[in-house]
Every structure is written in structure tokens, then in C-alpha cells.
Amino acid sequence: DIQMTQSPSSLSASVGDRVTITCRASQSISNYLNWYQQKPGKAPKLLIYVASSLQSGVPSRFSGSGSGTDFTLTISSLQPADFATYFCQQSYSNSYTFGQGTKLEIK
Amino acid sequence: QVQLVESGGGVVQPGRSVRVSCAASGFTFSTYAMNWVRQAPGKGLEWVAVISYDGRNKDYADSVKGRFTISRDNSKNTLYLQMISLRAEDTAVYYCARDVGLEVAGTVVRWFDLWGQGTLVSVSS
């Protein structure tokens, strides 16, 4: 199975900061990489698909990049609503593996 | 309103069975593949199973293969997950998720664009 590893596991930042979260695949997955945001007690929400495509309705401060094994999710200027947990997901293989998550907390 | 609503969770004894459901509305259910994803308390997301739009093709995570069965009834716009021989480690919130596929250069890229609110299955004696 393809393993997905996110870093860091947790991150403290302030409103207005630029934040980058990394996701690494155990083998090349081309650009078959999606990003989700999850708030406590809520279902995950799709942010980015196919590595860099912004889901409709998602603010433009979110962006994704990468291909092969290394990917990043960037939030250009943190807003209060962005404090949440973020997960990457590969769809290269049928197992649709998720990363372990990155919890973004207020500094 | 485009939505997915899960139901059927609860407390189940180890070794017993339960079926959870996911009712879809507001979109053409029969044209989408669907998935189950679970999240143990305080843990990350684990993909569980996928079923094709017509129900002919199914795939499962190794952790549930042989114990869980995904199915769908397109006439009722409903997705199911039958779980047998339940273990404590199956305790989780179970989400259904709509699978969007896009063909790009001869392959299909996929993502989950719509999720239900989840239903908690707690396996405990």
C-alpha cells in the first residue's frame, strides 16, 4: 500500500501568517493528491484536488502544489476559520490512503 | 439540497453485526461511485470501501476485507455498509463520501467532494 506522511503533525501559527503543510508519498503518485480540512465534530471538506485545483467555494488563500512524491498545501494569510486539521489523500491506488493529519492551532 | 445523511450507528457487542446507511439527495446518485471512510476517536481518516456507480465493482481496505460489505440501491438513492464480526478497533465515526472521477490522459483521477455528517459505531461489551 502507498503510505502518506504529513509534516508537521501539529503547527501553531497566528492570524495573517503564511503556512505550509507537506505531504510525502511512499512512491510516485503523479498528481493524484487531494487535500481536506476538518473541524472538530464535523465531516472533512474538500479543499484541493489533483494536487493544485481549488474546489469551488474555497477561498483563494488556499493553494496546492507538487507532483510525484512531494506535495504542499499553502495558506497565504491565515484566517480564524482556518484553524482546523488538514489531511492529504492519494487516489493513485484504489486504497485511497490518507495522511495522518496536521493540526493547525492558534499561537 | 445536495446532501448525504448517514444512519444506523450505535453500540454493538464484539462479534455482532450492524448495517449503516447513507441516504443521498439533491443529485443523481446512480451516476457516482461512493465510498465509506471511518475515523476512530481522536484519530485520522481511514478509507474503508468503494463501490462503482452501478454496484458492479467494489474494493475494500485490508483491515475490513471479508467482514464488511458495501452495497447500494440506486432506486432508493441509498448506500449501505454491512459490518459483521465487529471488533473493538472498528469503533469509529463512519462517513459516506461521493467519489468524483475525471479522465485525464487515459487515466481517472478521483476525489471526494461531498461527505455526510457521519454515524458513530461503538463496539463494546
Image (spheres, helix red, strand yellow):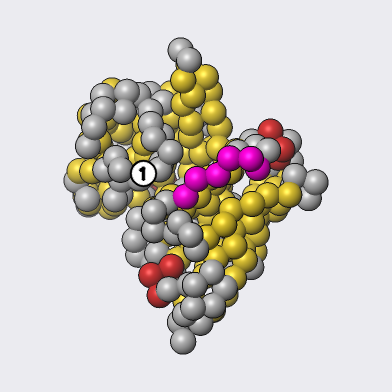
Q: Residue B30, can we see it?
A: yes
For the residue labelled by badge 1, is the local secondary structure a helix, a strand or a loop? loop
Between residue A78 and residue A40, name the one nearer to us. A40
As drawn, is A35 to the left or to the right of B108?
A: left
Mark 1 is on which residue type?
Thr
Q: Nearer the viewer, residue B89 or A22?
A: B89
Query: Could you tell me residue A90's position as x and y percent?
Result: 36, 36
- Left or right of A94 in this view: B25: right
Q: Residues within 10 Å of mark 1 (few under 14, many from 20)?
A: many
Q: Is residue B29 above or below residue B39?
A: above
Q: Residue shown at 26%/27% (left/top)?
A: A28
What percent of the width, then of the height, locates residue A73? 30, 33
Is A3 on the left-hand or right-hand side of B31?
left
Q: Residue B107 in magenta?
A: no
Residue at 50%, 63% (x, y): give it. Answer: B67
Q: Position of residue B70 (x, y in %)?
A: 59, 53
Q: Quadrant of residue B63?
A: bottom left
- Residue on which disc 1 sits: A97
Which residue is drawn at the image coordinates 58% and 40% (left, top)?
Answer: B57
Q: Hey, which residue is sitting farthest left in the picture?
A: A8
B88 sits left or right of B57 in the view? left
Identity of the residue furthest to the top in this view: B105
Residue range corresponding to the magenta coloring: B55-60
**Residue closest to the far right:** B75
Q: Residue furthest front?
A: B66
